[in-house]
Amino acid sequence: SGRMALQVQDSQQQSFSASFELQGRPDRGTLLIFNPLGSIIARLQWTPSQATLQQGERITESESLPALITQMTGSDIPVAALFDWLQGKATTVSGWQTDLSRIADGRLRAERYSPPPEASLRIVLDQEAR
């Protein structure tokens, strides 16, 4: 758990910043996104065959976890690699470059340069999550 910030360099210059809690494994898990007051604004759950995004009363189901992540944040985030990155494992993902030099301090930075649009992901983990 911690805070994440995602900036997408598209025509709208989208920016997404929120607290989060990630649970599970790359093939089966839950990502909760919280507003500044601590209320859940999005719940993303996935299994090997399906993903579900709940935002308030709206529920969207898909066979594609990346499609729902893009719908929620404006950019695809490689979930399987994210689990590794948060554990300090430098898993390579095509189009992404990661900086794990401060992971011991609970800080992670990843940049997507391909495919467009470019995106920048920054994560700061909570003290108790480390």
Image (cartoon, rainbow, N blue to C red):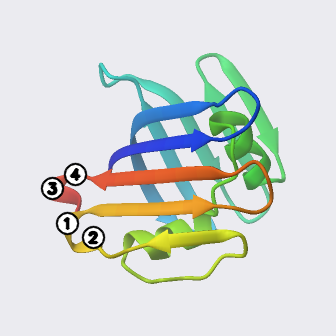
| Location of mark 3 (residue) | 127
- Compare residues 29 and 73 and report the one nearer the observer: 73
The residue where tag 1 is placed is: 105
Q: Is residue 55 above or below residue 119?
A: above
Task: Indicate which disc, 4 or 2, sits on the residue closer to the N terminus.
Answer: 2
- The amino acid on which the numbered mark 2 sits, given as a three-letter code, is Arg
Q: CA distance from mark 3 to mark 2?
A: 14 Å
Which residue is rendered at x = 61% and y = 82% of the image? 92
Q: Does dot 3 land on a helix, a strand or a loop? A: helix
- Between label 4 and label 2, give the one nearer the viewer: 2
Name the mark on residue 126.
4
Circles 1 and 3: CB atoms closer than 8 Å: no
Image x and y of residue 107, in percent: 30, 61
Q: Residues within 10 Å of mark 2 (few under 14, many from 20)?
A: few
Kind of residue indicated by mark 1: Asp
Q: Residues under labels 4 and 2: Cα distance? A: 14 Å
Q: Are marks 3 and 4 in contact (CB under 8 Å)?
A: yes
The answer to whether mark 3 and mark 2 are in CB contact below 8 A is no
Is disc 1 in contact with disc 2, using a CB cutoff of under 8 Å? Answer: yes
- Using the image, determine if residue 2 lies above or below residue 36: below
Sequence-wise first label, 3 or 2? 2
Label 4's element? Answer: loop
Disc 1 + disc 4, Cβ < 8 Å: no
Disc 1 vs disc 4: which is toward the camera?
1
From the image, tell me which residue sits under label 2: 102
Are there few (<14), some (14-19), or many (20+) residues within 10 Å of tag 3? few
